[in-house]
Image (cartoon, rainbow, N blue to C red):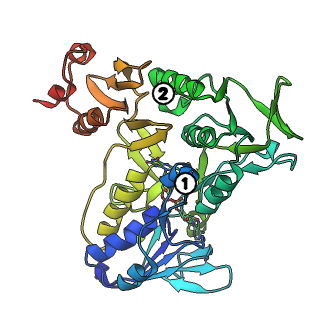
């Protein structure tokens, strides 16, 4: 089969789906490409949803292309279209209204959806989640000065919304079940920094607490404490959207398992972005990578393979977060080894390196973007490093790249 001439259907018109469609054409795919998404919007990038969309005078979404540009690329874009059926024998997917699309190659780029918290969904308080543009626009309207805003979850989403809510004059309380903020990062230095940053800006941080339920005007904790609340935003992680994968006969644990070419266990079926489960050398396990860089680059690599251009994608995960005026960047697995901290955590400018078997398997740069470019190269190259050099504050980090 000439792969470049096949009928490609992409389900999920988010960042991964959109970038894959573009990359297919760039790689010379001449067959029909149909990009199907359930949202009413053109494909867009999500990082702004918890940042500038909440903060700027006017919301300015980061659309990948205009409607005309999609047409010029000869990509058939179908928005407001939820795919509900997938049949591998007929090689066909179907919408709720009965419309069917035949494919030779299928790309699942269905992303994730927020993990819900039924115990607060009693109706006593407005409860929201943040995943899509409509969520962000509604949240923007709700964040009014003087409002008591409770964020359940002290991960990236909770803390980015906390910064926006503080900036908009709300009274903010963050509730985190773990003993520290940002527990997923696995870095004591970062957790300490985040705690001090948010408290200094005026948010109240409560770690090691469990939410029991929502009552009128408050969130009740398991120990009976009442936290005044006018609204609640729950940010306790996401789950992969894998219903269609199951219908096709794929089994999933956390996401859709793919190899370095983006291929699943079914011939002609690929997966990209947040929904794809890949082998992470830094973490030494299969996992989904929920970040912008993966949605962009793993999707592009997958598209090249679908067009017949063999390409392996193996980049270490890289993520950033903006909170108040601080920029946090994370590469690899910061909790995967022993942590070395360079710089000044209290002063808000520092870098961590996680060392396992003389290799850097992860690191964090807070307000130190230049160090991050070195960290990314160290993690990707698997170079042996000298621990005592890295512990020496006078040793220039970039010298560790020299062979
Ligand atoms: C609020 C927020 C802030 C973020 N900030 C950062 C950041 O600062 N830095 C960073 O690196 N990453 C950040 N991310 C993560 C990054 O945006 C995601 O990793 C990226 O969006 C994943 O892209 P995707 O295309 O795989 O999935 P998604 O963007 O989730 O797109 C999947 C699309 O598929 C659609 N879909 C699902 N099922 C179906 C179906 N059956 N039929 C039709 N359509 C369907 C969904 O509606 C969705 O539009 C953030 C994410 C969020 C939500």
x and y, in percent, of residue 398 in the image: 18, 29
Q: Quadrant of residue 391?
A: top left
* 397 shown above or below 329: above
x and y, in percent, of residue 392 in the image: 24, 13
- Count of picture labels: 2
* Left or right, residue 5 beside residue 166: left
Secondary structure beneath disc 1? helix
Residue that label 2 marks = 186
Q: Is residue 215 visible?
A: yes
**Mark 1 in CB contact with mark 2 (< 8 angstroms):** no
Distance between mark 1 and mark 2 Cα atoms: 25 Å
Secondary structure beneath disc 2? loop
> Which image quarter is the C terminus in?
top left
**265 vs 259, nearest the viewer:** 259
In the rendering, which numbered label is found on residue 49? 1
> Which image quarter is the N terminus in?
bottom left
Mark 2 vs ligand 1: CB below 8 Å: no
Mark 1 vs ligand 1: CB below 8 Å: yes
* Left or right, residue 128 beside residue 185: right
The disc, 1 or 2, on the residue closer to the chain's N-terminal end is 1
Check disc 1: other Cα within 10 Å, few if <14, some if 14-19, many if 20+: many
């Amino acid at each position: 089969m000439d792969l470049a001439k096949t009928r490609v259907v992409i389900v999920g018109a988010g960042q991964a789906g959109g970038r894959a469609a573009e990359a297919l054409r760039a790689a010379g795919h001449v067959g029909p490409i149909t990009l199907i998404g359930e949202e009413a919007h053109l494909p867009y990038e999500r990082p702004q949803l918890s940042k500038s969309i909440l903060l700027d005078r006017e919301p300015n979404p980061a659309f990948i292309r205009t409607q005309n540009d999609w047409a010029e690329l000869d990509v058939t874009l179908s928005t407001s279209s939820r795919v509900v059926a997938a049949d591998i024998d007929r090689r066909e997917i179907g919408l709720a209204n009965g419309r069917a699309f035949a494919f030779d190659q299928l790309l699942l780029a269905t992303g994730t959806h927020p993990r819900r918290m039924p115990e607060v969904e009693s109706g006593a308080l407005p409860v929201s989640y943040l995943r899509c543009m409509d969520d962000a626009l509604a949240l923007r309207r709700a964040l009014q000065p003087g409002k008591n805003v409770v964020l359940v979850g002290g991960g990236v989403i909770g803390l980015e919304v906390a910064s926006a809510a503080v900036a908009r004059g709300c009274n903010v309380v963050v509730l985190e079940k773990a003993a520290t903020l940002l527990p997923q990062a696995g870095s004591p230095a970062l957790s300490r920094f985040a705690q001090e940053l948010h408290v200094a800006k005026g948010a109240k941080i409560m770690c090691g607490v469990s939410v029991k339920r929502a009552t009128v005007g408050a969130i009740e904790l398991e120990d009976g404490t009442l936290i005044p609340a006018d609204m609640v935003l729950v940010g306790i992680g996401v789950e992969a959207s894998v219903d269609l994968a199951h219908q096709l006969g794929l089994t999933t644990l956390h996401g859709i398992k793919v190899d370095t070419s983006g291929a699943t266990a079914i011939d002609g079926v690929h997966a990209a972005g947040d929904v794809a489960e890949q082998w992470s050398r830094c973490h030494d396990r299969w996992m989904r990578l929920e970040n912008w860089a993966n949605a962009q680059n793993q999707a592009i690599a997958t598209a090249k393979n679908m067009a017949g251009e063999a390409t392996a994608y193996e980049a270490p995960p890289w993520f950033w977060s903006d909170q108040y005026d601080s920029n946090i960047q994370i590469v690899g697995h910061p909790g995967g080894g022993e942590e070395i901290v360079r710089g000044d955590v209290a002063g808000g400018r520092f870098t961590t390196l996680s060392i396992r078997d003389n290799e850097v398997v992860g690191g964090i740069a807070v307000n130190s973007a230049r160090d991050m470019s070195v960290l990314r190269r160290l993690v990707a190259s698997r170079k042996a490093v000298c621990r005592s050099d890295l512990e020496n504050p006078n040793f220039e980090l970039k010298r560790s790249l020299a062979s």
